[in-house]
Image: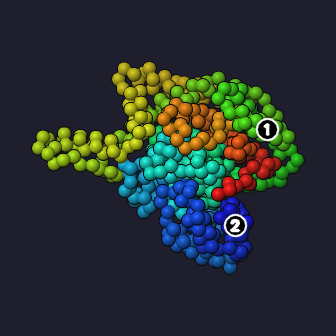
Amino acid sequence: MKLYELTIHQARALLARGEISASELTRAVLDRINAVDARVQAYLTLVAERALEQAHAADAQWAEHRRAGKCGETPPLLGIPMAIKDEICTRGVRTTAGSKILDNFVPPYDATVMEKLYAAGGILLGKTNQDEFAMGSSTENSRYFATHNPWDLERVPGGSSGGSAAAVAADEALFALGTDTGGSVRQPAALTNTVGLRPTYGRVSRYGVIAFASSLDQVGPIAKDVRDAATILGVIAGHDPREATSVNVPVEVHVEALIKAQDLAPLHGVRVGVPREYFGAGLQPGVAQAVRAAIRVLEALGAATQEVTLPHTDYSLPTYYLLAPAEASANLARYDGVKYGLRLEESNEMWEVTPALAWGASVRATRGEGFGAEVKRRIMLGTYALSAGYYDAYYLKAQQVRTLIKQDFDRAFEQVDVIVGPTSPIVAFKIGERADDPLQMYLADVFTLGQALAGIPAISIPCGFDQGLPVGLQIAARAFDETRLLQVAYAYEQATEWHTRKPGL
């Protein structure tokens, strides 16, 4: 196995024994990036020299711990190269959110998740491409370039965290962080044969994460296997007094819960719900077949499956596309060309009228040039939904339906421990295929929106292939029950080999 193909736990074992160094591992991944990223285009910004400096410091720490015989006490990510979605602020490293309006923005501080990753020993390789301000399902809405799926370079990797998913799938990082507003970690994970985890809303701090929809945004890991995802979650989760929606709930030791002794029926007593609404029209037959086969594996592992109903599933998409744009229209009002980011000046003749008119013209020019078409579309939709005379009819009604969607999940979890189904209704589609049809693009997230609206955790794991392209199995659990979620995902993963398959770049 090549060094860049290692998982976090495999690399850590080799580092602990001194069989490899963090510098060797980091150079191997950087060489891999140089070899394949011109075709994949996962990264917006690389910080190779900084990464090698961090790796050298990690080697010194490993050497000290080996001398002291305390390798088991090293930080969990010491010497592990990582990629970070460009939605997450990184001090001293350009952070654009995939937008031209932040093309020159270099944050003066780190997001909380970055502070935690650095404290755990992670090595930053660079920032990954994404749909502008996380608005999209294909990474085609980046204002820089489209990212390509390593399994088929003519196809999308999903979005909006498509750059992070493609980087992990192509072995251009050992793991990555993404953000999930309506499925933006899970859907690209499904399309690239990686593991994508959306934690419970409030489990991970959003401080330093560029906001799209504040009541929905959540940071989550994209990894090569479930054990790695659990490791990363253990690092980034926890209460943050700087972030108002951060919840003070203890963080379980997820990895230890996963690797406890497995018997022949590791899911004995686990109740698995299968929503009837997830297997209707619009689901690709090959995807349905792969997911049904995965459910049979869960049954073979001892789980008891039963049909459940989530009757408001069909309302998830219109509810999301009223609430998220409404929040986006408010969050993106801060980009006015005054405080940071792009600023376009109108001609000096404007000042001969009034300074106020000149400032207004500058704002219009800045936002008109700085924002892309999809961002403008959502700002207009959100502003309309919040406007006088329409607030009650649209925004308020959507909030009421959101409550009904959450109640659907609450009732289902009275009967079962987890809910399973497809992550995406289709496999990866061709670049440009849905670019002119926003509704078809939005439908790519139809199975991932409900969990985000309800604030519950969900994970996508590899479960098969259709037409030679990856299919993802989605597992959802009660709020803050990531341990059960990960146990079910890990048991399935250990019984199958889908996650071990690699694209033939």
Name which residue type carries label 2.
Lys
Local crowd size for mark 2, using a 10 Å CA cut-off: few (<14), some (14–19), many (≥20): few
Q: Identify the disc placed on residue 293.
A: 1
Q: Residue at x 79, y 48 (%)?
A: 496
Closer to the camera, 327 or 171? 171
Asked whether disc 2 touches disc 1, contact meaning CB atoms under 8 Å apart, the reply is no
Asked if residue 208 shows in the view, the reply is no
- Amino acid type of the residue tagged 1 in the rendering: Ala
Q: Quadrant of the N terminus?
A: bottom right
Q: Is residue 428 visible?
A: yes
Position of residue 124 measured from the top left corner of the image (x, y, whole percent)? 54, 63
Q: Give the answer, above or below, for where 318 lies relative to 422.
A: above
Sooner in the amino-acid sequence: mark 2 or mark 1:
2
Residue 420 position in % (x across, y down): 71, 36
Q: Quadrant of residue 326?
A: top left
Which type of secondary structure does the marked residue at label 2 adopt? loop
Residue identified by numbered label 2: 2
The residue that appears at 33% across and 41% down in the rendered structure is 368
